[in-house]
Image (cartoon, rainbow, N blue to C red):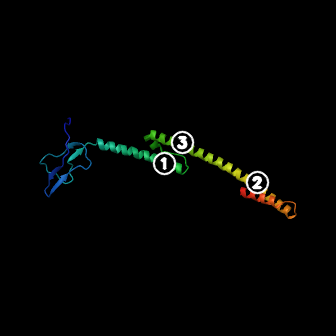
Amino acid sequence: ASMQEITRAVGRVVASSKLQTIQNLEGGIVESILVRPGDRVEQGALLFVFDKTRFQAESDAMTSRLDVLKFELIRLEAEANDQPLHFNDEMREKNPQVSQDQSNLFSSRQRTKDQAITVLRERLSKNTELLISANSQLQLFREELSMVERALAVGAESQLELIRLKQRIAQKE
């Protein structure tokens, strides 16, 4: 049977004790009406059956989103804890595309992290070399300072040379 008109309405059932309003909070399409005008109904009796299509579609969408979030959670935990990524067989079989997408993302992020670590290690190595070189130069300046101070004490070096050497040491420190 084709439906020609859809109408929203609030209905009333006359109960033996008091008036009660019947309404559906979610809305939807009535699939079948299980009571007829004048029927007596018991409390809790089923009056209408709603079409499940819309609700099933919403439920399926929410279930799908929940599945994706489960995959993301496992991937993020593996990334955060620096552990290998592992989805159980049931998850992979149920959602092979999501499993593949999350695995690819995990691999990509691991490569990016590894590249960043490599760059930082190279910078650390270079800065360590520079620090060692600067410390070596500073040590040489200190040795030279000691020699100039001894030479100055016996009159073999001028006070000006001592001042210049102290300035060079201050620049390196």
Q: Residue at x 48, y 48 (%)?
A: 74
Residue 105 falls left or right of residue 33: right
- Residue 147 in picture, x, y percent from top left: 83, 60
- Residue 158 in picture, x, y percent from top left: 84, 60
User: Does the CB distance between marks 3 and 1 fall below 8 Å?
Assistant: no
Q: Residue at x 30, y 44 (%)?
A: 55
Which quadrant of the structure image shows residue 166?
Answer: bottom right
163 lies above or below 105: below
- Residue 68 in picture, x, y percent from top left: 43, 44
Looking at this view, name the residue that lies furthest to the top: 2
- Residue 138 in picture, x, y percent from top left: 75, 56
Q: In which quarter of the image is the N terminus?
A: top left
- What residue is pinned by disc 1? 74
The crowding category of the residue bearing disc 3, from other C-alpha atoms within 10 Å (few below 14, some 14 to 19, many at least 20), is: few
Give the amino acid at mark 1.
Answer: Ile
**Picture disc at residue 137:** 2
Q: How many marks?
A: 3
Q: Which of the two discs, 3 and 1, labels the residue nearer the N terminus?
A: 1
Query: Dot 3 lies on which element?
Result: helix
Q: Quadrant of the C terminus?
A: bottom right
Give the amino acid at mark 2.
Answer: Gln
- What residue is pinned by disc 3? 108
User: Does the CB distance between marks 3 and 2 fall below 8 Å?
Assistant: no
Looking at the picture, tell me which residue is in the foreground, 148 or 118.
148
Q: Which of the two discs, 1 and 2, labels the residue nearer the N terminus?
A: 1
Residue 136 falls left or right of residue 82: right
